[in-house]
Image (cartoon, rainbow, N blue to C red):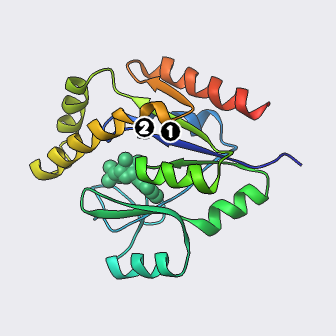
Amino acid sequence: MQTGRLIVLTGPSGVGKGTLLRSLLERHPELYLSVSATTRSPRMGEVDGKNYYFVSRSQFEQMIEAGDLLESAEYAGNYYGTPRQQVEEQIRQGKWVILEIELKGARQIEQTFPSALRIFIMPPSMTELEKRIRGRDQDTDTAIAQRLSHAQEEIAAASEFDIQIINDDLEKALLSIEAAIFTFKHN
Ligand code: 5GP
């Protein structure tokens, strides 16, 4: 049986990780995307159990205490975390599991799953990133400002990752991610 592996995708909010992931999963349905828990409110169109498990702060704190999360972090005033059980189960079954998480979580995974492949997605520039975040029109001005300052911190840490990919062209970025994952897969 094939050995399961963990792939971590990190990059600032607005860099286009969601779009890249959707295309990646369409092309490779054998990859399993972990659904995170969050205390953030659902955005328009987001579905509980599909985009996230939307939970209260006290539910989230209970999950941390019970050791149910593989990693967790506070980001722009909300908690986010990866439910441990589903990821470990998929890996046991030999699946390739993808986590789409922010920097602090990715650092925790480096400690707990040193064999994980960690990919950082870079924006072409900060100006372009701000344009994309504002263009989404999903966040308040305060949330946008928090996301931008977070983005700078995250980009400064990009070299900690195994691979850095600039998302200026979706198809090119996707090919680079595929190359990284499948080269890794055949190692
Ligand atoms: P958003 O609110 O835009 O969906 O996500 C905000 C940030 O939280 C994104 O950078 C996203 O990658 C990150 N994130 C989503 N789920 C998790 C998780 O389970 N753990 C961590 N550490 N970050 C997460």
Taking the spot 27% from the left edge, 36% from the top edge, the residue there is 152
Instruction: Find out if the beta carbon at label 1 lies less than 8 Å from the nearest ligand 1 atom.
Output: no
Q: Where is residue 57 in the image (x, y as percent from the top left)?
A: 33, 76
Alpha carbon separation for disc pair 1 and 2: 6 Å
On screen, residue 185 versus residue 57, left or right, reads: right
Instruction: Find out if the beta carbon at label 2 lies less than 8 Å from the nearest ligand 1 atom.
Output: yes
- Per the image, label 1 sits on a secondary structure element best described as helix
In front of the other: 155 or 180: 155
On screen, residue 71 versus residue 179, left or right, reads: left
Taking the spot 55% from the left edge, 76% from the top edge, the residue there is 67
Q: Residue 21 carries which label?
A: 1
- Per the image, label 2 sits on a secondary structure element best described as helix
Mark 2: few, some, or many residues within 10 Å (few <14, many ≥20)? many
Q: Which mark is residue 17?
A: 2
Whether tag 1 and tag 2 are in contact, CB under 8 A, the answer is yes
Residue type of the residue flagged with mark 2? Lys
